[in-house]
Amino acid sequence: MTWAIDSSHTTLEFSVRHLGLATVKGVFHRLSGEIEVDEQDLSRSSGRVEVEVASIDTRDEKRDGHLRSADFFDTEKFPTATFVTRRITARQGNRYDVEGDLTLHGVTRPVTLEAEVSEFIVDPWGNRRAAVAVSGEIDRTQFGLTWNQVLEAGRLMVGEKVKVHADAEVVLPATVSA
């Protein structure tokens, strides 16, 4: 059955080093997606997530504008990023490896993320729900996001490794599950 990502109860965050010192964090506010869930065997599930890249927010408008520009995401030319699962492998308990294709900045590359899935419940309105926490790391340069400056002692202004983390609720409306 097709479950929807409940975007009002979902957060997609990232973090990257600045000047080789501090970690700068940000979020993407607008995303959507669907997951085909096999509750009996989650490794037979699949999904697709789409992120509106211009919804980036690092709590600094000037930096966010630079990130939206052609130096980084070029959101006018590449307005969305997508992740499509290829394979889900059970690890231990409620943990899984999720292999998929990430398309970012017009480049598609394989990525493996770690996922933890909650129990499945029925909410007060009769909908089936679950939560999924997903995390991983990507090298932004592999997606053509190569803008940088080399500083004193060879430090990079912006780190190349980007950690990503999402906490998502997925929902199967009561009208579909009946």
Image (spheres, helix red, strand yellow):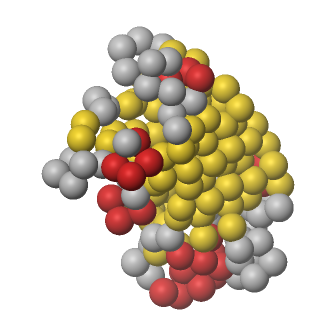
Residue found at the far top of this picture: 92
Compared across the picture, whether 154 is left or right of 18 comes to: right
Is any part of residue 130 visible from this angle? Answer: yes
Measuring 61% from the left and 35% from the top, which residue is drawn there?
46
Measuring 56% from the left and 21% from the top, which residue is drawn there?
43
Compared across the picture, whether 131 is left or right of 30 comes to: left
Quarter holding the C terminus is: top left
Q: Is residue 146 above or below residue 69?
A: above
Residue found at the far front of this picture: 178
Q: Is residue 145 above or below residue 116?
A: below
Quarter where residue 78 is shown? bottom right
Q: Position of residue 30 (x, y in %)?
A: 50, 70
Q: How many marks?
A: 0
Measuring 35% from the left and 65% from the top, which residue is drawn there?
8
Q: Position of residue 147 (x, y in %)?
A: 75, 67
User: Is 2 in front, or is 60?
Assistant: 2
